[in-house]
Image (cartoon, helix red, strand yellow):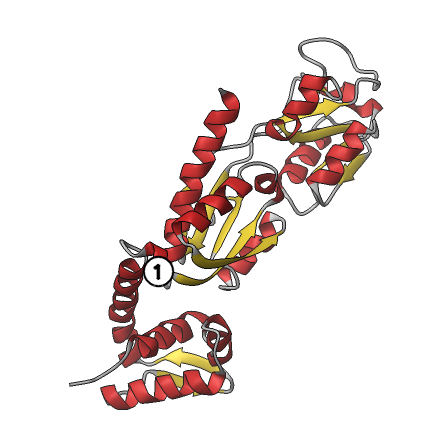
Amino acid sequence: MANFTLRQMEAFVWVAALGSFCKTATKLNTTQPAISTRIATLEDQLGQQLFVRDAGQVQLTSAGQMLLPKARRLISMADDISTGEGSEKQSGILRLGVAETVVHSWLPDFLKALSRRFPLVDVDVLVDVTVNLRNELIDHRLDLAFLMGPVSEYRIGNVDLPVFPLIWTAAPELEMPDTPQVPLTALLEHPVITYARTTRPYAELRQKFSDLNGPLPRIFPVSTLAASLRMALDGVGIAVLPHTMVREHLATGKLRQIHCEWTPPELVFTASYSAEPMNALAHRAAELARDVAIEWQNRIEA
């Protein structure tokens, strides 16, 4: 009877997922020789070769393909046990990617809730645009990401999060028609401040102006929402921003909402996590993020 360990099975599952002993060592916070030893010992115990190593590439053998779904279930069961009733004992690092829109809303509440639920888990936070977060997640350099989703990839699980409506907003000194339905062409009088070039809001906005078959406005794609907000407050131009981010400035009169005939679609977010191999901590953290985000949204709308 084979006498394998969870650490050997964990190494096997991650080498199969990443296709690399080196990347697996980084993922599991160990060395490549240690991973090689675990796999070699597992192969000896099972009496079967699990991987073919050829010119730096690592591929599953037929025996490895048969073992993989069983190994995944075993690791998933172990994760469920470790993050179940004894969640306070769960330790490790959760590599979290966050789009900036979430940073300016419910992220602090989430981090506090996560700390209470998993006090021994440390969090590494990367703030970036969705396209980069998606790539990092698929390449297993992130465990969980709050991004404009869902991520259409079979290895990624998605938990729906509350949406973020966008509005047009500007400083009061900018001259704009004071009507319920400002024509989109009226925005051409001022620069338009929007999300970075690699984002969905920028692409949708540029396409909408292109459909007018007229001159394009001066579009200022800005890499951070904080900078966009500052530019709007300083009267540089008309900004497209999440309503939740500017609601206090609207209340104080530092900004006013421009009710245009067209507004960019609301931002749809998901908590997306690695589901292949299953990461029970990331899955539970994604569900926690959903609950925290809904509670935050209900609170600010009350």
Nearest to the observer: residue 115 or residue 127: 115
Farthest residue, direction left: 1
Q: Amino acid at mark 1?
A: Lys
171 lies left or right of 97 = right
- Does the rendering let one see residue 216? no
Q: In x, y percent, where is residue 126?
A: 59, 55
Nearest to the observer: residue 188 or residue 285: 285
Where disc 1 sits, the SS reads helix
Q: Which residue shows up at 39% across the image and 85% down it?
A: 52
Dividing the picture into quadrants, the one containing residue 44 is bottom left
Q: Which residue shows up at 28% across the image and 65% down it?
A: 78
Q: In x, y percent, where is residue 12?
A: 35, 76
161 lies left or right of 108 = left
- Does the rendering let one see residue 61? yes
Tell me if mark 1 has few (under 14), some (14-19) or many (20+) residues whose alpha carbon lies within 10 angstroms of its own: some
Q: In x, y percent, where is residue 84?
A: 28, 54
The residue identified by callout 1 is: 89
136 lies left or right of 286 = right
Asked if 239 appears above or below 8 in the picture, the reply is above
